[in-house]
Amino acid sequence: MNFTIPETSKLRDKAFTFGVATASFQIEGASTADGRCESIWDRFCATPGKVLNRDNGEPACDHYRRLEQDLDLIKSLGVDAYRFSIAWPRIEPSPNMWNEAGFAFYERLVDGLIARGIKPYATLYHWDLPQYLEDRGGWINRETAYKFARYADRVSARLGDRVASYATFNEPWCSAFLGYRFGVHAPGLKSHRLGFQAAHHLLLAHGLAIPAMRQNAPQAQHGIVLNVTPSYAQSDSADDQWAAAFADDENTHTYLQPLLQRRYPSRVFDRHPDWAPTQLASDLAIIAAPIDFLGINYYTRSVVKKASTGDYTNVPQDGAKTDIGWAIYPTALTQLLVDLKTRYSNLPPIFITENGAADNTGLVDGAVHDMMRTDYYQQHLNAVHQAIEEGVDIRGYFAWSLMDNFEWAEGYSQRFGIVHVDYQTQVRTLKTSGKTWQIFLAER
Ligand code: FCB
């Protein structure tokens, strides 16, 4: 099989970066190796009732111990870049203790990629906060933002321009809202007020970190990655239209407007003054530090209506879904990208830093025919192509994920990889989707 992409598409241009993505906690395992400290996800997994089947980060894909083999696997795909995250608990396992073994692991990773002709795209924070920081309030505590900036300084000083692209945060919405507002991710708190406070401190941490990162790695690109699930109104009624606009402000523009326009969307805090975070007058100027790229993670859309109590509710939809229950709706990706361009005159170049599907098709006779995932990629490549045609500056696309891994509160029940992982034997098997990527990438 191959993806069908128009001959003249920019997606066929070698300047367009294709990659695969992972995150430290989801693949590494080795959670006590070489001095790594406990993270909030280790603690959360150990708390009964939080993660499906009480799964945890051990051994995940045992990637920490199988690094060389996995680098060869990445190379075999023919990708231009590999997006991974760095585990803060390996780098600073106790306050102000900078762990040489932690730096050494990521140095081997980065140098191993470069030796294979693959560009390293590093994310500094993909949710694995050291537990000792959570013990002092985590992202509710303003101090954590300064601690993050120091950590980002150390890592970027060490890896420097060997890393092609640095993202401060992956999906601060998830860290703040799933972690502190809705309680479904670590650390599991449930408060609107704390959710928005955590969001503010994550954004502040981003802004505080960027200047030193730039100084340490002047040739690299620096930015941040947001997850966006666009909200569609269930009907044309003014109420439902309002609900969709409110939901987008709450979930997307609460993050994007401070970054690009130095302000929070007024709709949310006008309606809920008690949700507004405590901040200093200078914070928004720090948060809006110029960035070189914006990463967008896109999986699905939602449909909402005005709620009888509260603001809005999600309306379940019929139609195609992936195995995790997320609607397959590629045109929302095109519309989202075009909307962002219209709405933000200073929108930086975009990378689709994650896109993919949970397709739990298993191994049969040594092969995984994951046709739903393969088709999902085809449809979303079409959507990205279309957005480029409509004038959006999109520079790259990363498939989530390189391989099956620990899917947070869903444990190992959901498989997102283009490579199958047998967690018992740790054997990796390229799926049909992975083979399709291989053929497409080789033919560019
Ligand atoms: C995103 C996360 C990533 C992965 C995918 C399925 O929200 O960034 O770690 O779990 O969802």
Image (cartoon, helix red, strand yellow):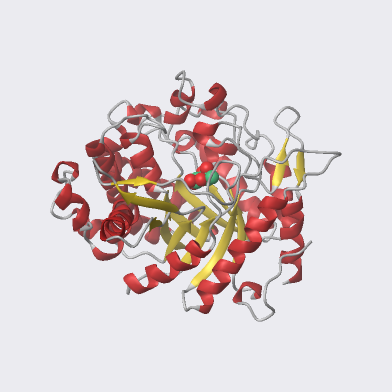
Relative to residue 280, is residue 324 drawn left or right? right
Let me know if residue 85 appears in the view. Answer: no
Which residue lies most toward the right here?
Answer: 365
Nearer to the camera, 389 or 108: 389
Q: Position of residue 187 (x, y in %)?
A: 37, 30
Image quadrant holding the N terminus, namely: bottom right
The residue that appears at 38% across and 49% down in the rendered structure is 153
Nearer to the camera, 67 or 155: 67
Q: Quadrant of residue 68?
A: top right
Which residue lies most toward the top here?
Answer: 48
Nearer to the camera, 130 or 396: 396
Let me know if residue 294 appears in the view. Answer: yes
Relative to residue 439, is residue 167 drawn left or right? left
Nearer to the camera, 233 or 8: 233
Relative to residue 270, is residue 14 drawn left or right? right
The residue that appears at 66% across and 51% down in the rendered structure is 112
Q: How many marks?
A: 0
Q: From this view, report whether residue 192 is shown above or below residue 205.
A: above
Image quadrant holding the C terminus, namely: bottom right
Q: Quadrant of residue 412?
A: top right
Which residue lies most toward the bottom here?
Answer: 8
